[in-house]
Image (spheres, helix red, strand yellow):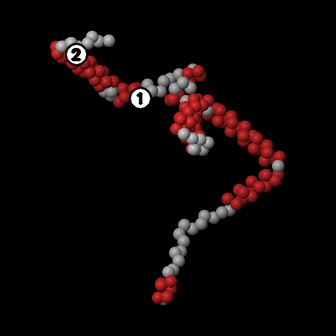
Amino acid sequence: MTLPIRNTVELRDEIYRLQGVEAEQSAALKKRFDSPGAIFSTVMSLFPKSDDKEDKNSSLFNQDFIGLISRFVLPIALNKTLFKNSGFIVKTVVGLLSQKASHYINEDSVSDVWGKVKHLFEEHVSENPTVTGIFGKIKGLFAGKKPKPRLKKAPVPEYVKKAS
């Protein structure tokens, strides 16, 4: 903590000292950003290199792609669907909790859940020929559809019909 300034001489000295500190800090910043390599290393310092599993979920940039997406999609999806008519405080709490929950969502957990659901679905379809037939019909409906023409003929107005 600095001493209180009692007169104009001390004030002037403090101003000069702060100007010197500013000059030193600006010189250090210029040195840090003087080349493209220095800029690149500064940006890459945002992404720390760590192979430790415990430290992997501690930073935003150390998550995998699915984890990063879930940090944004999960709170938005919950607030737009389940908590649609909730107040500001509830939506804030949901946002904070879903940010914490997104650390547990990664590519491995999503692929494991997807594999289990796919396996259950394949078992159900293979055991029930009715379901297999229904899916075949649905595929046939969409596979045989031809695209509709985009331009439609405009109706001819009555006054044009009468004139000809």
Q: Position of residue 125 (x, y in %)?
A: 78, 47
Disc 1 residue type?
A: Val
Q: Quadrant of residue 23?
A: top left
Q: Position of residue 157 (x, y in %)?
A: 50, 81
Q: Quadrant of residue 100?
A: top right
Observer able to see residue 72: no
Return the residue nearer the eye: 1 or 155: 1
Residue in the image at 68% along x and 34% along y:
112
Return the residue nearer the eye: 61 or 11: 11
Checking the image for residue 14, the label placed there is 2
Crowd band around label 2 with a 10 angstrom C-alpha radius: few (<14), some (14–19), many (20+): some
Looking at the rendered structure, the secondary structure element under dot 1 is helix
Residue in the image at 82% along x and 52% along y:
129
Q: Position of residue 155 (x, y in %)?
A: 53, 77
Checking the image for residue 43, the label placed there is 1
Q: Quadrant of residue 35?
A: top left
Task: Mark 2 or mark 1: name the one nearer the start of the chain.
Answer: 2
Q: Nearer the viewer, mark 2 or mark 1?
A: 2
Observer able to see residue 164: yes
